[in-house]
Image: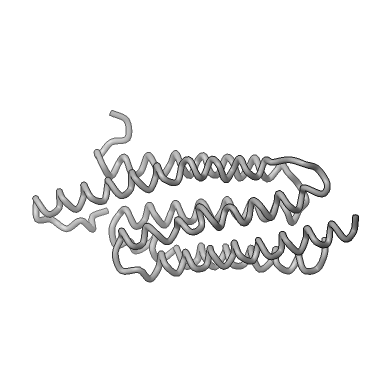
Amino acid sequence: MTPLLSYSLAAALLCYAVAIALALPRLLRGPAAQDRILALDFISVNGMLIVLVLGIRHASTMYFEAALLMTLFGFVSVTAMAKFLFRGEVIE
Amino acid sequence: MTDLKTFADAVAAILLLASGALSLIAALGLLRLPDFFQRMHAPALVTTLGTWCAALASIVHFWVTDFGLRGTVVVILLGLTAPVTTVLLARATLFRRRSSEVSGTSETGL
């Protein structure tokens, strides 16, 4: 691995971490419930990206499966929460 | 072979930096934009272009050693699911705003 790639890997990981930190006030303060759900979705996507980039850093393709699972769980949880906001229940 | 590897690493590095920058821009948009419907646009940057860049970087990096397109599966799945969550959230927000206008209560519950 060239130094250029390892430095940019670290920079990308730092960017994702800062993005998650910037999304945290939106998650904690709102103002409405849908803002919190949006911030949670954003944080889950960023976590998935961190896993994807860690896969390059550790030179392992196993991280792809973890990223896939994180995407799926993020989708299911955000859909369930949006549906809860809409109806007041998840499964009718 | 080493030339090819160096070139692939450089391409992956540029894609990774682009992905990180897009993620930061999206986070700033999520934090700073005034209305919810404007804020919905910001995370779409990451779910589309940011994820494409990161997945392409990993594909380019692993392409030299073992050929596989597993990175694209993540992007395709995210491309299928992101519009669904966006539409559901927008509809829920519209519904909540309308019902709060009718009943006169604030929508900033929860």
* Residue at the far left in the pictured view: B103
In the figure, is residue A30 to the left or right of B14? left
Farthest residue to the top: give it. A92
Position of A49 with respect to A92 (left or right) is right
Q: Quadrant of the N terminus of chain B?
A: bottom right
Where residue A1 sits, quadrant-wise, is bottom right
Nearest the viewer among B11 and A91 is B11
Specify whether B98 is left or right of A81.
left
Q: Horizontally, is A3 left or right of B107 in the view?
A: right
Q: Is residue B14 above or below residue B62?
A: below
User: Which residue lies at the image location 13% right of the left edge and 55% below the top edge?
Assistant: B105
The picture places residue A13, in percent across and down from the top left corner, at 63, 63
Residue ID at (28%, 36%): A89
Here the colouring is one colour
Quadrant of the rendered image containing residue A53: bottom right
Q: Is residue B28 above or below residue A42?
A: below
Q: Residue at x 69, y 66 (%)?
A: A10
- In x, y percent, where is residue B9? 78, 60
Identified at 66% across, 68% down, the residue is A11
> In the depicted view, which residue is nearer to us: B89 or A80?
B89
Residue furthest to the right? B1
Q: Position of residue A29 (x, y in %)?
A: 34, 64
Residue B67: x and y in percent read 78, 41
Instruction: Count how many numbered circles sit on residues in the image.
Output: 0
